[in-house]
Amino acid sequence: MRPPVDTITAPPFPRELEWVNVAPLRMDKQLGRPVLVEFWDFCRPNSIRTLPYVRAWHERYGDDGLRVIGVHSPGFAPSFDPAAVRAAVARLDVTYPVVVDSDLEVWDLYGNQGWPARYLFDRTLTLVDYHYGEGAYDESERAIAELLDIEPPPFTPLRPEDAPGAALAPQTADQEGAYSGPYEAGGVWAVVSGRGALSANGKRFAVDGPGCLALLEHARSTAGVLELAVSGAATCHATCFTPGLAA
């Protein structure tokens, strides 16, 4: 989405924050190159579903001058721990710079409104495109390519619901803790920590640390009944539902 004005510039990063994969970055030192800032949380399914696209843009356009910066702003208790963030960055193969925003300082500077969220700045560090939530991957890539003055490859969605113009059905709202009951969604996820296991409709999932687990995935938005149980020293902090194609 194009911003309504062309006068919004990238805020500076607070200097005391911890960084992963790089020495502390200064935003003013990025002048002369486009910058994509992605707010995410390794415990949020929507962030995890968006992550492959962001990784691909970093790999595809880094040599052309694009700087990708991840801002890890936690929304669940397990993702406030900087050590857990560093472990998640390694586990999820995130190789671009990530700033650990545990106190939501960067979040507040941007006036950010949710996860995931991406902000694209031009070579003068002026905001030219932004998006909240999943989707609009083709639009974002075309905006990146336009700033780099190159032609992007044809867009290939990773999931049918990511295709441009896909009609999505409203999904069940996220539920606190381990939820059992009716739902309608394209997928069911659990936000977890600790050590133990989850059982979702009879299928067992090992829990060996903080993160989120994909429990059920459907080709389209599906109405069903979830039976979710937790065992061992695992904790389920939330049960989350992701969108699917409308029937």
Image: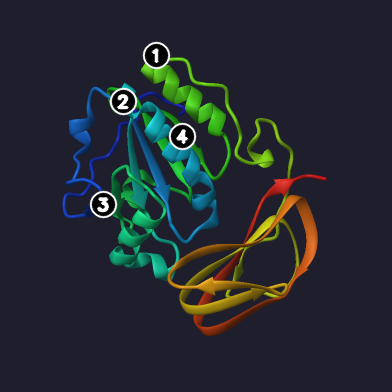
Q: Which of marks 2 and 4 is nearer the N terminus?
A: 2
Mark 1 and mark 4 residues within 8 Å of each other at the beta carbon? no
Instruction: Please give left or right for residue 118 compared with residue 238 in the image.
Output: left
- Residue, far right: 247
Q: What residue type is labelled 2?
A: Asp
Upstream in sequence: badge 1 or badge 2? 2
Q: Residues within 10 Å of mark 4 (few under 14, many from 20)?
A: many
- The residue under the point 34% across, 24% down is 122
Q: Describe the element under mark 4 as helix, strand or loop.
A: strand
Image quarter of the C terminus: top right
Task: Kindly report the distance in space between the C-alpha atoms of the residues bearing marks 4 and 3.
Answer: 24 Å
Find residue 149 and name its label: 1
Q: Check disc 4 and give the amino acid type.
A: Tyr
- In the image: residue 114, left or right of residue 10: right
**Foreground residue, 31 or 216?**
216
**Residue 230 seen:** yes
Residue 172 position (above or below residue 137):
below
- Say the numbered circle drawn on residue 63: 2
- Disc 3 secondary structure class: strand
The x, y position of residue 195, in whole percent, is: 46, 79
Give the label on residue 130, or none: 4
Distance from the alpha carbon under mark 2 to that under mark 4: 22 Å
Residue pointed to by mark 3: 20
Q: Which of marks 2 and 3 is nearer the N terminus?
A: 3
